[in-house]
Amino acid sequence: MNRSVTYFIYCIIALGMIGLIGQLVYNPVGLFKNLLIIVIGAAIVYFIYRQLTKGKPERKEQQAFSKAARQSKKRQKNKNASIHAKRDNVASISQAKSSKSSSASKIKMRKKSDIHLTVIDGKKNKKKNRALF
């Protein structure tokens, strides 16, 4: 940014601060009244904006995505909790049966993949049903 523009912006901010302090000292009721009017006006504009953008499809899709993500996290948490419980159960049983070396009695659990892929048939090589002219 150019230095003169920066100085100009600082000057405007300083004058605004001086004006607010002067208004607060000499007319505090008027200052609070103006601030209240600004807040009410901003609230009205905000609520009108919310009403106009309420039924947008993007927002509904976003809500559906958020819901699906929450359900997925919950399912994953339950799955991990059950896996840990099984591991603890298997480890305690194996330790109770044999008191030999602990490294020899460890049971390896096969970790399942969390990836769920779906194959979608493409139409790249399929010919279209059109009449040739």
Image (cartoon, rainbow, N blue to C red):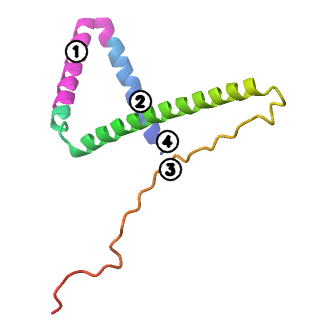
Q: Mark 2 points at which residue?
A: 11
Q: Give the range drawn in magenta.
A: 23-48
Marks 2 & 1, CB-CB < 8 Å contact: no
Q: Which of marks 3 and 1 is nearer the N terminus?
A: 1
Per the image, label 1 sits on a secondary structure element best described as helix
Report the side of 96 relative to 61 (left or right): right
Give the image location of residue 98, x and y in percent: 78, 28
Across and down, in percent, residue 121 comes to: 36, 67
Whether residue 39 is in magenta: the answer is yes
Residue at x 48% of width, y 45% of height: 2
Instruction: Give the amino acid type for the residue marked by disc 2 in the picture.
Output: Cys
Query: In the rendered view of the protein, which quadrant contains the C terminus?
Result: bottom left
Query: Residue 103: x percent and y percent?
Result: 81, 35
Q: Quadrant of residue 24?
A: top left
Q: What residue type is labelled 3?
A: Ile
* Element marked by disc 2: helix
Instruction: For marks 2 and 1, give the one nearer the viewer.
Output: 1
Depth check: 83 or 74 in front?
A: 83
Front one among 31 and 106 = 106
The single residue placed furthest to the front in the displayed view is 97
Instruction: Measure the C-alpha gap from mark 2 to mark 4.
Output: 12 Å
Quick check: marks 2 and 4 in contact, CB under 8 Å? no
